[in-house]
Amino acid sequence: MDGKAVRRLVIVGLCILHSCCYQVTIIVREAKTWTEAQSYCRENHNDLLTINNVEESTMLGDSLRNSDKEFWLGLYGNFYNFVWSMVQEGFDEEGQAEYSNWQRSQPNLDKGTINCVNIATTGEWSDTDCWLELPFVCYNDSSANRYLFVDQTMNWTNAQTHCRKHHTDLASVRNESENNEIGSIIQSYSWIGYHRVSWMWSDGQARHVHSFNNWGTAQPARVRGYCATTKNGKWTERPCSDKYFFICNETMKKHVRIKVVLTKSDSSKNLEEIQDAILRQFNEIMKKNQISEQVRLKWIEQPDGTIYQKTEEQEWTEKQDFDCVPPALP
Ligand SMILES: [Ca+2]
């Protein structure tokens, strides 16, 4: 064996990989009403489970495959949750977001998952099926005539897409004078930007018309007083006062520390430039592997404010020689 001592000047920095927020699913086998289950999850974990996409849904379906039970999810019907299409900071002044001008006995469509609001020439509003083809009113915040009547019939979603593409959004109405203005420019029942988001997640996310869902056949048929369970991944509406097992989520954060060692010291190079370049390289690698969205990288500062520490380390490299002996012939 032949050993050789090598002295190197090494510069050591610590880099932290902060992988944000991966969800852990906790299955609780104790029957509770939806509200009791929500309280339990909020006290002991994070919240009742939200399912955002097909991957999360498939993973949950796989883990429940051998169970014949139903479990509450965080999804609940919110009958009166009407919202405007246009979300613009500072658009509503105090109290104006609450303005409405429903026709008598409206809104009355309490079935299905979606419904959208039209305005009559009288200025009165009704809720109806979003797939109806109606003319519509757009809002344009950079035009002198803010409200524009579009005399083409489309379903509510296509009307929204049209207004967002050519103007600002489907019309929002903040008060009686704006409502009268719209009533005076339309020629028949027309869409405005108001629509009901009937299903909400316990964590506050609205389940919009086109967001992911995994309802079973002919579900959901009702909204009021109903919450959603899952069995084998499919969703079913059940009265929220029924008792089922349930699923909570927990948000975990993971930190990984990486020690970066620069073995070639070059005093002519600015260490701060090097550290930025190293982070950029790591970020590029993560981007290529499609993990950059969940992971954040940062350098760890030492108590004295620096990132790098210069140390003189003694390191041994070893060289081992083996004799190559051919196998003995029998
Ligand atoms: Ca109606």
Image (tube, rainbow, N blue to C red):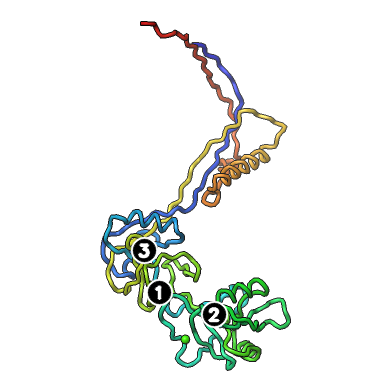
Query: Count of labels shown?
Result: 3
Q: How far, Cα to Cα, is label 3 from label 2?
A: 29 Å
Q: How far, Cα to Cα, is label 1 from label 2?
A: 18 Å
Q: In the image, is residue 306 above or below residue 231?
A: above
Identify the element where label 3 is drawn.
Answer: strand
Place of residue 84 in the rendered image (x, y in percent of width and height, measured from the top left): 55, 77
Residue at 71% across, 83% down = 145
Q: In the image, is residue 277 above or below residue 47?
A: above
Q: Earlier in the sequence, mark 1 or mark 3?
A: 1
Q: Nearer the viewer, residue 122 or 292?
A: 122
Please report contact status of discs 1 and 3: CB closer than 8 Å, yes or no. no
Amino acid type at circle 2 is Tyr
- Label 3 CA crowd tier, 10 Å (few <14, some 14–19, many 20+): some
Mark 3 or 2: the one toward you: 3
Residue at 41% across, 64% down = 214
Residue 234 numbered tag? 3
Residue placed under numbered mark 2 in the picture: 194
- Label 2 CA crowd tier, 10 Å (few <14, some 14–19, many 20+): many
Quadrant housing residue 70? bottom left
- Label 1 CA crowd tier, 10 Å (few <14, some 14–19, many 20+): many
